[in-house]
Image (spheres, rainbow, N blue to C red):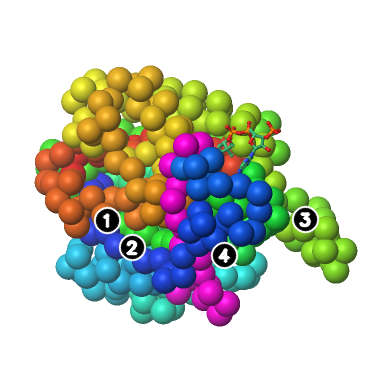
Amino acid sequence: MPNTNAYILGTGRSYPEGVITNADLEKMVETSDEWITTRTGIKQRHKAAGGEYTSLFAVRAARQAIEKARIDASDIDLIICATVTPDQILPATGCLIQAELGAHRAAAFDLVAACSGFLYGLTLANQMIRSDQSRYALVIGAEILTQYVDYTDRGTCVIFGDGAGAAVLGQTTGERGILSSRIRSDGRFAEQLFSPGGGTRLPATAETLSDGMHFFKMRGNELFKVAVRSMTEVSTEVLSEAGYKPEDIKLFVPHQANQRITDAVADRLGVEESKVYSNIAMHGNTSSASIPIALDECVEAGTIKEGDLVLMASFGGGATWGAVLTRW
Ligand code: COA
């Protein structure tokens, strides 16, 4: 019997209408459009309004993915919501999404792997599908990061934006689907990007809030170097495991962290610029949402077509990283 494989049947994306431009940030902190553009490639990022929450955008993205996959929400038996900005501590945002979609047959949960969350989710869903424990899996990356951004800290406030992306995976026995994937982490880098307050270690109090302990703290410079090294290594691993070379890739869709990280990884891998997808100018870094948003944009624009070899790679807080190689 041929091996069962998992492939992406449909994608979707959604983000808030509100936008913060570099010009807006120039009025908030000592920065400039020129600095932000040359150091990050970002021109604007979406920002949720008061009353907008993570699952709102996740559900919109998921509905599109389900429609494009031509299945019914009740066919889904696995929902993985990758997020570091859940609607609330309990229950999982995945369960709230499940209820909203009417996907009552699914097992639903949240996955915390920061910007690598979507690729962690794809990797788990792939294994569930390959082992026949799941037929249709919904993997979502959804974040409202701007609620954890300190708009007096110029080192972080220029980077992050909000949004959600989703993908429905199904079974195939054909020559398509996820060919290889790897996920990795190293907790020794935990303090390169973290939010110290609000958990059990430093519970939320009036004081932790006024001290801004719930905001993201980032050592951008250190993180940059680890991101480039680990994304390059893990991408090389998945390519060689599947028996491909960088020149075989039709499209490289990296996590949109910083244009300079993307450029450095592509350069080290030897992937030519025309094959590297970037939307960071319009969205900033949306953490777990960045890859599924990018995939949906590519499918819609016809940049990804059936049969294309697509490499995805990510790096995020934790530190976490991973890569997935798929035949679309
Ligand atoms: N505007 C103007 N100046 C800024 C600034 C801003 N928004 N942010 C930082 N600076 C200043 C710093 O204060 C520093 O000034 P100093 O030399 O007087 O001390 C100078 O710019 C250089 O800071 P540095 O942190 O070394 O800059 P950088 O070239 O590393 O760029 C980042 C900063 C954050 C853009 C970059 O490190 C980065 O993108 N890192 C990865 C971030 C990331 O991807 N995070 C998510 C991971 S998934």
Mark 3 / mark 1, whichever is N-terminal: 3
Q: Which residue is mark 1?
A: 296
Tag 2 near tag 4, CB within 8 Å:
no
Disc 1, SS:
helix
Instruction: Write down the residue under mark 4.
Output: 86
**276 or 58, which is in the foreground?**
276
Residue 46, x across and y down, in percent: 46, 62
Q: Distance from label 4 to label 3 (Cα)?
A: 17 Å
What span is colored magenta in the figure? 38-56
Q: Amino acid at mark 3?
A: Met
Q: Residue flagged by tag 1: what amino acid is it?
A: Asp
> Contact (CB < 8 A) between labels 4 and 3?
no
Going from the N terminus, do you reach mark 2 or mark 3 first?
2
Distance, label 2 to label 3, CA atoms, is 31 Å
**Label placed on residue 190:** none
Quadrant (top left, top right, bottom left, bottom right) of the C terminus = top left
Q: Is residue 20 above or below residue 245?
A: below
The amino acid type found where label 2 is placed reads Arg
Q: Which residue position holds label 2?
A: 13
Residue depicted at 33% across the width and 43% down the height: 278
Type of amino acid at the residue the image marks with label 4: Pro
